[in-house]
Amino acid sequence: MTAARLILFYAVVAVLAASCSAGLLNQFISTITAKYYSQMSTKESYRFEVKEPNGNSREEVGIIMNPGTPDEQLVVMGSYSTYDEKTDTETITIYTADKGGYKPHFEQRKRGLMRRTLKSLANG
């Protein structure tokens, strides 16, 4: 989600909070959360996923490696993708983060090209 969209989202939520009863707002937020966000946590790990209606998404897994030892560390692996409608380009970032730092891998691709290629293969 771009920063402007995120700010707009929080502004809408703030306006709703000011004008709605607490019960209605909680129902609205619960519906949004259930539709676009999932989360699972354990004592030594977590996993979450966000899928926006516009095709942007993020998925992440965090695991505590070697718990209770001097080598204990949190290792995070995940990916996020964004879609730019103007250029019909999807950017996918796959990353890991641990004691060694943040290590991203980027990939860009045109969505339209993928659709055209699949369509030509299907008609082929």
Image (cartoon, rainbow, N blue to C red):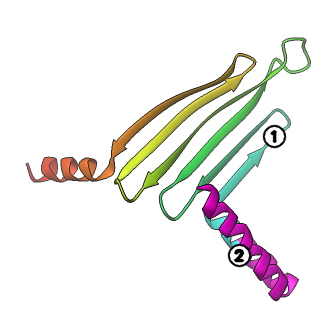
Mark 2 burial class by Cα count in 10 Å: few <14, some 14-19, many 20+: few
| SS at badge 1 | loop
Where in the figure is residue 51, as x and y percent of width and height? 56, 57
Tell me the magenta residue range.
Answer: 1-30
- x, y percent for residue 84: 42, 54
- Main SS, magenta region, reads helix
Tell me if 28 is positioned left or right of 5 in this view. right
Residue in the image at 90% along x and 11% along y? 70
Q: Which mark is drawn over residue 30?
A: none
Is residue 20 highlighted in magenta? yes
Q: Give the labeled residue for mark 2.
A: 12
Q: Is residue 122 above or below residue 10?
A: above
Real-space Cα distance between discs 2 and 1? 32 Å
Residue displayed at 19% across by 47% down: 117
The disc, 2 or 1, on the residue closer to the chain's N-terminal end is 2
The residue at the far front in this view is 4
Q: Amino acid at mark 2?
A: Val
Q: Judging from the image, what secondary structure is the residue with disc 2 in?
A: helix
74 relative to 34 in the view: left or right: right
Query: Which label sits in the foreground, 2 or 1?
Result: 2
Percent x, y of residue 34: 67, 65
Label placed on residue 42: 1
